[in-house]
Image (tube, rainbow, N blue to C red):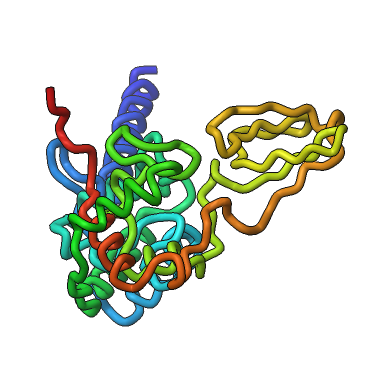
Amino acid sequence: MRMVGVQVENFVARLAASVLVAGVSLAAQGQTPAPGQSPKNPFQPTPQTLQEGMAAFRGNCAYCHGMDARGARGPDLTGVFRSGRTEDGLFQLVKTGIPGSEMPPAGVFLPENDIWKTLMYLRTLSANEPSEPPRGDAANGEKIFWARCSGCHRVNERGGVIGPDLSRIGVARTRSVLVRQIRGAMEDIRPGYEPVTVTTPDGRTVRGTRKNEDLFSVQIMDSTERLQGFVKSDTRAVVREKRSVMPVYGSDQLNEKDLDDLVRYLGTLRGASPRTP
């Protein structure tokens, strides 16, 4: 009986050692950083890894950031490394997402290896893409904004709420993207601002931006910033429009100089200003 007990003890010891070795091996394969250390990219920028990074970006990120990474629904990423961001910091941001924003935790659907390769691909765009030279008068652009745009858009808690908040638009959009949006050349509409037209039983039409919708009802904000809810079965029609409620500012409404000034001002908007007493 004693011999059997010794054999069992030896077997358990060998099994425990095997489990420990396997655990160490798996940890090494997963590139798990030690406590207090930032994760490091385990890959080198080879033609193959850069190609795989481009494929991962276009398959998972281009819907919001554009096929060329210049921004659409999400911000422009071509200069993300020139702005001082680090690869390990961006890795954590991409993996965990940004709470309260449209940026999801990519770690849920994108393997860590693909995140690293995507970041290497974005670094090549930062290296090759020259920054656009500034033009326009930001001071005059600010005046144009408050005269023409603040009825719908908000900056630092001032202005309208029909359109998106622009307090950080200078971080999120390049000059070329802003120009296309103002001139009406882009059809991308941010979620929460999709245009909807509701026809009531008496034939009245109410147009606004969709805020909430389910199978039975829809809630929109009209041009006066009034929230209105409708039961779909009680309406004649609920039509999702393809054109944004934002007006198209052609050159007859906003000349090139004023456009340059406005875009220069928008480029300075990079976060809420400190409150003044």
Image coords of residue 158 (percent x, y): 32, 34
Image side of residue 86 versus residue 167, left or right = left
Q: Quadrant of the N terminus?
A: top left
**Count of labels shown?**
0
Image coords of residue 13 (percent x, y): 29, 31
Residue 242 visible, this angle: yes
Image coords of residue 249 (percent x, y): 47, 64
Of 42 and 212, the residue lying toward us = 212
Q: Quadrant of the C terminus?
A: top left
When the figure is inspected, residue 75 is found, relative to residue 165, above or below; the finding is below
Image coords of residue 38 (percent x, y): 16, 46
Q: Residue at x 84, y 38 (%)?
A: 203
When the figure is inspected, residue 139 is found, relative to residue 210, above or below; the finding is below
Residue 206: name its quadrant. top right
Image side of residue 196 versus residue 111, left or right = right
Residue 276: name its quadrant. top left
Image side of residue 220 versus residue 188, left or right = right
Extreme residue toward the bottom, this view: 47
When the figure is inspected, residue 196 is found, relative to residue 201, above or below; the finding is below
Q: Residue at x 35, y 24 (%)?
A: 3
Of 45 and 123, the residue lying toward us = 123
Q: Residue at x 25, y 63 (%)?
A: 261
Extreme residue toward the top, this view: 1
Residue 26 visible, this angle: no
When the figure is inspected, residue 277 is found, relative to residue 201, above or below; the finding is above
Residue 33: name its quadrant. top left
Image side of residue 80 versus residue 107, left or right = left
